[in-house]
């Protein structure tokens, strides 16, 4: 069977390894079948299609391990005053002005535009949380059709919560369960995740119910964890222990648990994450925006925890998100050695795939999925083995992504997202945003 040979200037197989000069890959269908020097690949497979990329770096696609795609609709919303902290951000802004007003059309408009943004940014896989209590039921099913058309590898979930009512919380859990069941029957690149919001919006019984539903279906169970100081203070007051210790007491702090944010956690919780195999997703830029703080990611990495990187629906360009992870921790902990560029690249690729429990995704090796991106490597100074990761993290953006493959299918070529009518996508999103904003004015 004939395949495609991609011949770049540089190849990143795994960010934990040195980049390879003048090495490329062969893909057949959705799978990488060979990795070798460019000239050797051309000799081995003379009948294959050749994709020449003499100025580019070939890398695994990025994995956006946590986002809220509908979040783009909040960009620029009119506000009388900015929220004064994390709790006011939720109670006075995010819940009443955004999430409680979402409908299917708004969710789908935002999803379509942001899927194209992610592809243009080199993202090939993502995990999205939707909380829209008055858009139940069916919002995940509507959203999934958009994601399938765009061809990304997507995990979708409804952020079930009892903050509106216990009945609404059950609708959220049912949305997740029915969507997961449907995706498992259907197969394909779009799948579901079980999700509850937090310890302060969900009862013990509700959290345990969500966890049991996840275990029955063999999927991850996700929650936001200690995004600001509010939740650990709440947990200490209500349960006599910090958030992750409470989850351990409930029996769900294990490798089936995906904990996003993990900003306000202490050393004992870092140890617990590593010991129990809890998966973590890190959102450096949005944590700053909401005033939540700066997560102890260098310590989690040092403890060999599974860590992925996410945009949280704040800034789409994944290079900007990586720059945040690269720079913020150095400044916060007064140590320029922290979070070297290759580690940031790792958590943006294979680390994120591991956080989402994706198999054979995030690395370029025979037998692994052909989720790939080409990035233009023409910089003012030469790319070399010793500086490649740092140069890319510091000086590349979405505009420099030239090609993207998801499961072996080309989704971006010559810098253009295929089948993306940007004018229509943006107009639809603006209309959805104005509808959302109408009650905020």
Image: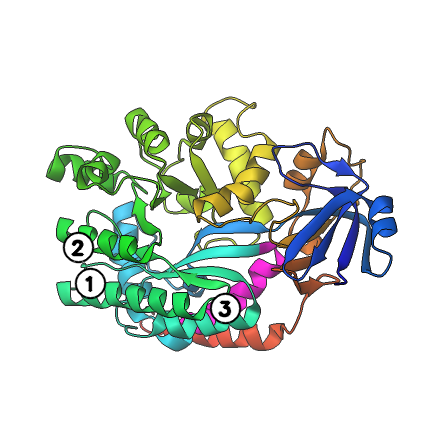
The residue tagged 2 is 206
Measure the alpha-carbon separation of dots 1 and 3.
Answer: 25 Å
Disc 1 is placed on an element classified as helix
Residue 49 among those drawn in magenta: no
Mark 1, other Cα within 10 Å: few <14 / some 14–19 / many ≥20: many
Q: Which numbered disc, 2 or 3, marks the residue that appears first in the sequence?
A: 3
User: So how many labels did they put on this image?
Assistant: 3
Measured along the vertical axis of the image, is residue 336 above or below residue 353?
above
Which of the two residues, 209 or 374, is positioned nearer the viewer here? 209
- Check if mark 2's residue and mark 1's residue have beta carbons within 8 Å: yes
The structure residue drawn at horizontal position 50% and vertical position 51%, both measured from the top left corner, is: 64
Q: Is residue 52 at all visible to an observer of this figure? A: yes
- Check if mark 1's residue and mark 3's residue have beta carbons within 8 Å: no
Q: Which numbered disc, 2 or 1, marks the residue that appears first in the sequence?
A: 1
The structure residue drawn at horizontal position 27% and vertical position 38%, both measured from the top left corner, is: 229
The structure residue drawn at horizontal position 17% and vertical position 55%, both measured from the top left corner, is: 206
- Give x and y (percent) for residue 264: 31, 35
Which quadrant of the view contains residue 80? bottom left
Q: Report the colour scheme.
A: rainbow
Mark 2, other Cα within 10 Å: few <14 / some 14–19 / many ≥20: many
Residue 416 left/right relative to 325: right
The residue tagged 1 is 169
- Magenta span covers which residues? 107-123
- Give x and y (percent) for residue 140: 37, 69
Quadrant where the C terminus is found in the figure: bottom left
Q: Which mark is residue 147?
A: 3
- Give x and y (percent) for residue 386: 73, 28
């Amino acid at each position: 069977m004939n395949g495609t040979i991609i011949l770049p200037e540089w190849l990143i197989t795994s960010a934990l390894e040195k980049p390879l000069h003048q090495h490329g890959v062969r893909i057949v269908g959705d799978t990488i079948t060979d990795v070798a020097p460019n000239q050797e690949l051309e000799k081995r497979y003379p009948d294959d299609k050749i994709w020449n990329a003499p100025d580019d770096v070939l890398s695994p696609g990025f994995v956006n391990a946590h986002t809220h795609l509908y979040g783009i609709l909040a960009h620029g919303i009119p506000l009388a005053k900015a929220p004064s902290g994390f709790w006011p951000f939720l109670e006075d802004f995010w819940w009443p002005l955004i999430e409680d007003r979402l409908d299917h059309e708004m969710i789908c408009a935002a999803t379509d535009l942001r899927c194209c943004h992610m592809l243009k940014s080199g993202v090939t896989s993502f995990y999205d949380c939707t909380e829209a209590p008055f858009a139940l039921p069916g919002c995940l099913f509507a959203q999934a059709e958009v994601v399938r058309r765009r061809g990304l590898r997507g995990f979708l979930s409804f952020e079930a919560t009892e903050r509106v009512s216990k009945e609404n919380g059950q609708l959220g859990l049912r949305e997740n369960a029915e969507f997961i069941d449907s995706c498992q029957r259907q197969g394909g690149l779009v799948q579901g995740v079980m999700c509850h919001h937090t310890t302060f919006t969900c009862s013990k019984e509700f959290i345990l119910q969500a966890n049991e539903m996840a275990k029955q279906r063999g999927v991850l169970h996700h929650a936001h964890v200690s995004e600001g100081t509010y939740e650990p203070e709440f947990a200490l007051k209500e349960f006599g222990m910090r958030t992750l210790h409470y989850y351990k007491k409930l029996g769900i702090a294990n490798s089936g648990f995906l904990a996003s944010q993990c900003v306000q956690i202490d050393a004992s919780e870092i140890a617990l994450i590593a010991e129990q195999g809890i998966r973590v997703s890190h959102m450096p830029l949005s944590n700053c925006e909401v005033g939540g703080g700066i997560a102890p990611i260098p310590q989690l990495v040092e403890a060999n925890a599974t860590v992925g990187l996410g945009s949280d629906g704040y800034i789409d360009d994944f290079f900007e998100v990586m720059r945040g992870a690269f720079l913020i921790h150095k400044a916060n902990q007064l140590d320029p050695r922290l979070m070297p560029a290759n580690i940031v690249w790792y958590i943006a690729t294979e680390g994120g795939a591991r956080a989402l429990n994706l198999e054979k995704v995030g690395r370029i090796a025979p037998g692994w999925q052909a989720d790939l991106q080409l990035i233009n490597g023409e910089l003012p100074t030469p790319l070399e083995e010793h500086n490649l990761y740092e140069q890319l993290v510091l000086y590349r953006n979405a505009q420099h992504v030239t090609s993207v493959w998801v499961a072996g299918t080309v989704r971006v070529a010559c810098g253009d997202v295929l089948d993306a009518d940007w004018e229509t996508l943006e107009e639809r999103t603006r209309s959805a945003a104005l509808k959302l904003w109408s009650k905020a004015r």
